[in-house]
Amino acid sequence: MYNNEQFMLFAKDARVLSYLSKNQTLNTKRTFSEKMKDPDYRKRWIKLIWRWVKILTFLFIIVSMLWGCVQMYQSPYAIQDVTDLTGRKVFSAGISFEIVTSIFGEHTSQNWWNIITGNMDGQQYAYNVIGSWGEAFSKTKSPFYGFFVYPIALLLNSLIYMMSSSLNPELNETRYGIAVIFAMLFTVIIIKSFTLIFTWKSQVNQDLQQRVQLKTADITAKYKGDKSPEAKQKQQREINAIYKKEGFSPFSAMAGAVVTMPFLFATYAIVRSTRSLKVASVGLISLIDKPWSQIKQGEYIYILIIAIYLPLQIFSMLLPLILQSIKQPSSTLTVAQKKSRKKQYLIQGVFALTFIIIIISVASGVAIYWIFSSTFQICQTLGFFFYNKKKANNSSQEINRRRKQQKNRKIKTNNI
């Protein structure tokens, strides 16, 4: 038999067990809104949502970019040149595909150029025009023109209109040309600043990315001769361990590069098709004409664009590797790391060669835009390099300060 004291203890334990059991039941039956009150649960959901937002945004950008790359070369959206009375190939407003901004007083105006055949028969050039943001969606059925091309064209025309009070160069050709140049410059700054929001992490970690590439080069060299599945698995595990230790994500680095690509292709489409740029000239340089084509026709002023653009573009592409080589000289690298660095230089060299080929086929306005873009990229790369350097120095000073404090404490403790 239980005495009174034992009975009271038993009853108390039973109440505690009943309370815990009740709470456990309540926890398992909590609604979603009740679970969201838990900070840890809410944090997990926010991370999951943000991850899916990034994935869907990445896929949308990829689809839009590929869609635009194919679409801009289809006949309704392609840009044609015409033959003038002197037999020269020139580009003209009012033919092919064209973008106008009606809110600034621009009007669609077809130019009556004809295609002359061998029998001296004429055929009218096609004219496909977009006059509003709504038409960018309704006529093209394209996210590329709706979300990228027309908004940037609208921004560019807004800046031109603010500085020249018109989108008609005939009123004041010199003022209009200056306005176009500054509008392109400010457009580059705005777009680059916007994309920096999404690429900030990859830009800050640019030095980390190159350091990780050098470390993975040693692992790749380690398993180079072994093609067995076990070796491949070990190699991947070691590479993943480096990624985890350094806090590096290959997807983030790739996504940072992809985010800027639609704006690059959109700029190419805008300069070729926007009416306000088709009719624009900067001095003797027409923005719609191709530099190489004009040089072959004796217009040597266009050499200036190539002479400025190519060195800037190549330097902007090689600058991260140059800065990394300064920070970590080749003398401190292993054989595998030296090979990896040479490979990186080779890849950038191939990209530079690609841009040399591209410059032959693009409009002068695109090349001028890329001159501003390359200059901004150089400044941005240098800015992040010195930012990371200062951050590393501050971190090193803080570590030395803490070590000095620990050393002083040990000395005081030993003296006591």
Image (tube, rainbow, N blue to C red):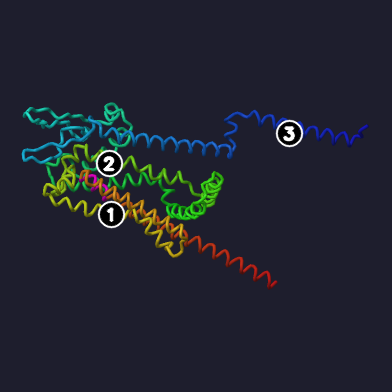
Residue that numbered label 2 is attached to: 267
Q: From which residue to which does the magenta span run?
A: 364-371
Q: Residue at x 60, y 31 (%)?
A: 34
Q: Residues within 10 Å of mark 2 (few under 14, many from 20)?
A: many
Image location of residue 11, percent across then percent down: 83, 33
Q: Is residue 371 left or right of residue 229?
A: left
Disc nearest the viewer among 2 and 1? 1
Disc nearest the viewer among 2 and 3? 2
What's the distance in space between the residues labelled 2 and 1, CA to CA?
A: 18 Å
Image location of residue 327, percent across then percent down: 42, 62
**Up/down of 20 relative to 290, above or below:** above
Residue 20: give its label: 3
Which is nearer the eye, 258 or 111? Answer: 258
Q: Quadrant of the C terminus?
A: bottom right
Which is nearer the eye, 158 or 207? Answer: 207
Residue that numbered label 1 is attached to: 312
Q: Earlier in the sequence, mark 2 or mark 1?
A: 2
Which secondary structure dominates the residues rendered in magenta? helix
Q: Is residue 73 left or right of residue 397?
A: left
Q: Residue at x 38, y 42 (%)?
A: 258
Which is nearer the eye, 338 or 188? Answer: 338
Q: Is residue 119 left or right of residue 157?
A: left
Image location of residue 85, percent across then percent down: 6, 38
Residue 91, image quadrant: top left
Q: Residue at x 9, y 28 (%)?
A: 122
Q: Looking at the picture, which amino acid does disc 1 mark?
A: Leu
Q: Looking at the picture, which amino acid does disc 3 mark?
A: Leu
Q: Earlier in the sequence, mark 1 or mark 3?
A: 3
